[in-house]
Structure formats: C-alpha cells, structure tokens
Image (cartoon, rainbow, N blue to C red):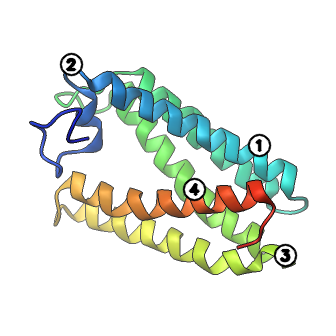
Amino acid sequence: MLIIAPDVAWTEPDSNYALGDLGWLRQVAFMTTGVAAIALALGIRRRFEGKGVRLTTVFLYVSGVAQIGTGIFNTDPTTEGSPHDLLALLSLIGLLGTLFAIRGLFARNDAWKSLATPALVAAIWFVVSVAVAITNVVEAGAVQRFVFVPVTAWLVWVSWNIREGRNG
C-alpha cells in the first residue's frame, strides 16, 4: 500500500488506497480477494459434505461478490453510504459469518476438528477488532490491519490445507 499511495498514512481506511494514480491496483486487489473467497467456497463444496457446507459457502459467496463490487465501485471518502461502502460492509458481514460457519463445519467433521478452535479464535479476533473500530479508540486503518492481516493469513492457510486435502 505504501507503494500505491505513499502519501496516505497507514492508519487511513484501506479504501483510501484506491484513490490516486495507482489506486486501480487496490481496486484489483479488492476484486481478487472476492474471486479468492468464491474459489474457497467452491473448494469447500468439493471437499466437505453434510451440515454447515451450504451456510459456509453462502457466506463466502456473499462476501466474495460483495468484495468484487467493492473493487468495481470507486471509493469516495467524502460520501458515506456509497455503493463501495455498502458492499464493503456486506463483505465484512459475509466474512464474519464465514468464520463462525466454517468453525461449525470443522467441528462437525472428525478429520478437520483440529481447525475448529483456530476458526473460533479468528472469529473472536474479528469481533473484538470490529468493537475496537466502533469505539474509535484506534484509527480505522490501524484496526483494519489488525483484523485483516491475521484473519487473511489464517484463511490462506485454511485454503491451502483444503486444496491439499490436509486437515491442519
């Protein structure tokens, strides 16, 4: 992000990196994240059976489509309630739902039970981070990094394990 917009402080909201000459790179990153969420949903549908698969994949599809939309619509820091902002919120709700649903999916699957607790930790991490963001104690951008770096790393790790057929 510092390369895309070196003049934007890291404590600024993530969407502000989509502004400026190289902002299109951030928009592509939003869309790529959405495609990745949809790919994870497809992988889960292929790898798992039973209760919880549909709920987990629906949350991932919602989050993925919303994240793609977040990248399509330009961010406007002067206007609240823009399509970009609403889709970003929908994406976050989808991600939160995914974390709790995937935790249940793992807990019900004997081969993947070892990932249930890390999924719960990621979900709680997400909830605590959102609570911190709502209180405005910390700058929005700092909270976003606090949330997204570990949760994204965890989701990449889970995706890799699902792809490889490993259970943690």
Residue at mark 2:
21
Residue for badge 1: 42
Q: Secondary structure at mark 3?
A: helix
Q: Residues within 10 Å of mark 1 (few under 14, many from 20)?
A: some
Q: Mark 1 vs mark 4: which is more N-terminal?
A: 1
Going by the numbered disc 2, the residue's amino acid type is Asp
| Sequence-wise first label, 1 or 3 | 1
Residue position for label 4: 156
The residue located at (68%, 47%) in the rendering is 40
| Residue matched to label 3 | 111
Q: Are marks 1 and 4 in contact (CB under 8 Å)?
A: no
Nearer to us: label 1 or label 2: 2
**At which x and y percent is residue 56?**
71, 55
Density class for disc 3 (Cα within 10 Å; few <14, some 14-19, many ≥20) is few
Give the CA distance from mark 1 to mark 2.
34 Å
Q: Are marks 1 and 3 in contact (CB under 8 Å)?
A: no
Amino acid carrying label 4: it is: Val
Distance (Cα) linking label 4 and label 3: 19 Å
* Callout 3 amino acid: Ala
Mark 1 to mark 4: distance in Å?
A: 14 Å
- The answer to which of marks 2 and 3 sits earlier in the sequence is 2
Image position of 22 with respect to 35: above or below: above
> In the figure, is residue 91 to the left or right of 5?
right
User: Mark 1 or mark 2: which comes first in sequence?
Assistant: 2
Judging from the image, what secondary structure is the residue with disc 1 in? helix
Amino acid type at circle 1 is: Leu
